[in-house]
Image (cartoon, rainbow, N blue to C red):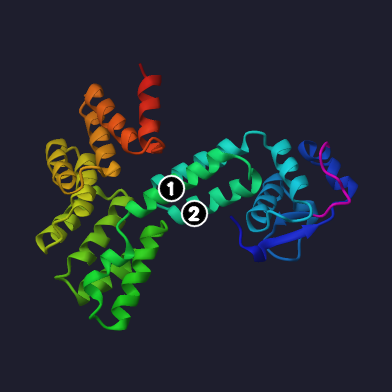
């Protein structure tokens, strides 16, 4: 979603309206249109359909009661009839990547676009639940309260970078933390988390093992380590790590889903299906379990 400073309202000349075939049928030239623009000095000849759509979605997310809100909603849906599904899928994808902030921004745009759609609110609740299952900032900072302010600030910045999919930016900050506190398991966990998201599986494995060695023997570390081991093909050890994690939190749907994914990688579809159905018994709206069960049905 664009920043509010990149939204410009424009009244479109008739010639420009008719130059956009997918817009000309629905646009009313006398109503200003919010568009995403790189600056306030907008070249109307360079406007694209994506700039129209992005601007209207941003406005609806920020101000659902705008005087032209209903018009903008109709216009977006006329231009892109399948946009609700497109945005919902994009939100799923960002949540899968651990980028919850952006996933929720997309959901807010969906709510602005279709405020009566109960399914969107269910999706938002599901993503919020997943975000709560992510190792919380408070948990990871639990043992840092006695540290100096610069250390804690760097840690918080690095954590937020990883949480919001800026993993590459986080790495040099994490390296500084390790240089200052090489015996603190939390910084090794943070390193492994960033490396796992960057798909550097072997490096992530080493970081998580170091975290366990230094005292981070908990479900989150074992679960993350299992993902890396799964990706480098060590399926037996991955299973052991997931079972350790599950013994600590038997109803953690993230861990159970990973056991289902591992079962699929082991060509055990029946066991995988069982794990995903257990997830749905705990959370009927869990999108990961629903997605994998749908894929398994389609591939039969």
Res 221 label:
none
User: Where is residue 239 shown, x and y percent of the image?
Assistant: 15, 38
The quadrant of the rendering that contains the C terminus is top left
- Give the residue at mark 2: 102
Q: Residue at x 31, y 82 (%)?
A: 149
User: Where is residue 123 shown, x and y percent of the image?
Assistant: 48, 42
Taking the image as shown, residue 8 lies to the left or right of residue 131, namely: right
Provide the secondary structure element on which disc 2 rests: helix
Taking the image as shown, residue 20 lies to the left or right of residue 298, namely: right
Decide whether the magenta segment is chiefly helix, strand or loop: loop
Residue 119 vs residue 60, the one in the foreground: 119
Tell me: residue 142, above or below residue 73. Answer: below
Res 127 label:
1
Classed neighbour count for the residue bearing mark 1: other residues with Cα under 10 Å, few (<14), some (14–19), many (≥20): many
**Residue 203 shows in this picture:** no
Q: Kindly indicate the quadrant of the structure image that contains residue 58.
A: bottom right
Tell me: residue 242, above or below residue 180. Answer: above
Magenta stretch, residue numbers: 25-32
Taking the image as shown, residue 17 lies to the left or right of residue 55, namely: right
Magenta-span inclusion, residue 31: yes
Q: Residue at x 23, y 46 (%)?
A: 228
Tell me: residue 162, above or below residue 235. Answer: below
Classed neighbour count for the residue bearing mark 2: other residues with Cα under 10 Å, few (<14), some (14–19), many (≥20): some
């Amino acid at each position: 979603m664009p920043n509010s400073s990149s939204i410009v309202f424009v009244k479109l000349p008739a010639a420009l309206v008719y130059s956009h075939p997918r817009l000309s049928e629905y646009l009313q030239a006398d109503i200003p249109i919010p568009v995403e623009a790189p600056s306030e000095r907008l070249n109307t000849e360079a406007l694209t359909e994506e700039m129209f759509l992005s601007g209207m979605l941003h406005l609806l997310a920020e101000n659902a009661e705008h005087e032209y809100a209903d018009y903008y909603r109709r216009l977006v849906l006329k231009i892109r009839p399948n946009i609700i599904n497109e945005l919902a899928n994009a939100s799923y994808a960002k949540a899968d990547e651990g980028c919850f902030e952006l996933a929720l921004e997309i959901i807010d745009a969906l709510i602005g676009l279709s405020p009566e759609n109960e399914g969107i609110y269910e999706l938002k609740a599901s993503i919020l639940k997943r975000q709560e299952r992510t190792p919380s900032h408070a948990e990871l900072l639990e043992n840092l309260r006695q540290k100096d302010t610069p250390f804690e600030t760097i840690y918080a910045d690095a954590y937020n970078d990883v949480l919001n999919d800026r993993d590459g930016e986080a790495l040099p900050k994490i390296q500084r933390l390790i240089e200052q506190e090489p015996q603190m398991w939390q910084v090794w966990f943070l390193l492994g988390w960033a490396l796992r998201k960057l798909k550097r599986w072997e490096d992530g494995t080493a970081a998580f093992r170091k975290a366990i060695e230094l005292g981070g023997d908990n479900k989150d570390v074992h679960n993350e380590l299992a993902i890396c081991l799964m990706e480098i093909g060590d399926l037996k050890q991955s299973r052991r790590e997931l079972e350790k994690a599950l013994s600590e939190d038997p109803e953690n749907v993230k861990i159970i889903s990973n056991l289902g994914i591992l079962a699929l990688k082991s060509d055990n579809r029946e066991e995988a299906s069982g794990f995903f159905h257990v997830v749905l018994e705990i959370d009927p709206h869990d999108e990961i379990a629903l997605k994998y069960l749908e894929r398994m049905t389609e591939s039969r």
